[in-house]
Image: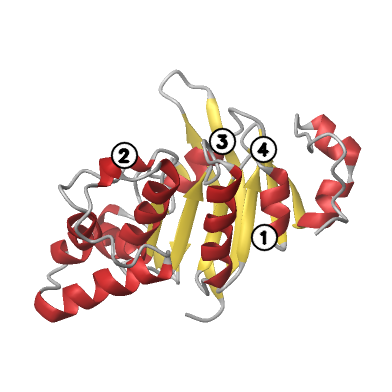
Amino acid sequence: MTGAAVEIRGLCFAYPDGRPALQAVDLDVGAGERVAVLGPNGAGKTTLVLHLNGILSPQAGSVRVGGLVVAPATQAEVRRRVGIVFQDPDDQLFMPTVADDVAFGPANLGVEGEALDQRVVAALDVVGMAGHQARAPHHLSFGQRRRVAVATVLSMEPDVLVLDEPTSNLDPAARRELADVLATLSLTTLVVTHDLPYALELCPRSVILDDGRIVADGPTADLLADRDLLAQHRLELPRGFHPSWR
């Protein structure tokens, strides 16, 4: 994929009670970019990313992935192109073994036999879980389950990877292991996170979403160095942390 991997124009969405969740959002993400989506609770971050693979549909505006309009008629292809890793890995792991979970998506696309086995092995190798195919997911640590959840998406060979709060409930070692995995990927990646140091480590660019609007877009280090901007949108760096630290 070349050019813009994700193009969002004038995206609007309101909850059933009429409260706006997204208000005329415009966003371009280039192929191969890693972009963090930052913002306080209730800003619309998860609502935004659920539009990327058609889980939610725009009430106004448009979303394109690799030039393809996200719409009911394109849903199957869009969901192949955009993989979302949810905050709780147990939302994605439901089969008896790790291999079954990682194979589930491509098998439903018609991949079978040796080709399917190769996808499973390759995806698990990327996330550092090779050799765990026969394990039951509920016997893994939380950090291991998070990485297997990433593998279930990678086995679909997506163009865009979306991670919703990837460091939630991870201990420091698991957090580092996941960062090492994500840093090796050449996929276009959006990271929705409250973990500002993690955003700085992984994503050269960040956008800040608040009240359903993009209020800032720029180099992550520059945004995190702007204390007034962070305070205005209820974002905080850890005490003593400075964005010049890498």
User: Residue beneath label 4, please?
Assistant: 39
Q: Are marks 2 and 1 in contact (CB under 8 Å)?
A: no
Task: Give the Cα separation between the discs numbered 4 and 1.
Answer: 15 Å
Upstream in sequence: badge 4 or badge 1: 4
Upstream in sequence: badge 3 or badge 4: 4
SS for callout 4:
loop
Above or below residue 47? Residue 71 is: below
Mark 3 neighbour class, 10 Å CA radius: few under 14, some 14 to 19, many 20 or more: many
Task: Give the Cα separation between the discs numbered 1 and 3.
Answer: 20 Å
Mark 1 neighbour class, 10 Å CA radius: few under 14, some 14 to 19, many 20 or more: many
Q: Please provide percent x and percent y for residue 212.
A: 61, 36
Above or below residue 197? Residue 187 is: below
Tell me which residue sits at (48%, 55%) in the image.
162
Say which of 45 and 56 sits in front.
Answer: 45
User: Residue beneath label 2, please?
Assistant: 91
User: Residue beneath label 1, please?
Assistant: 203
Q: Are marks 3 and 4 in contact (CB under 8 Å)?
A: yes
SS for callout 3:
loop
Amino acid type, label 3? Gly
Task: Give the Cα separation between the discs numbered 3 and 4.
Answer: 8 Å
User: Residue beneath label 3, please?
Assistant: 44
SS for callout 2:
helix
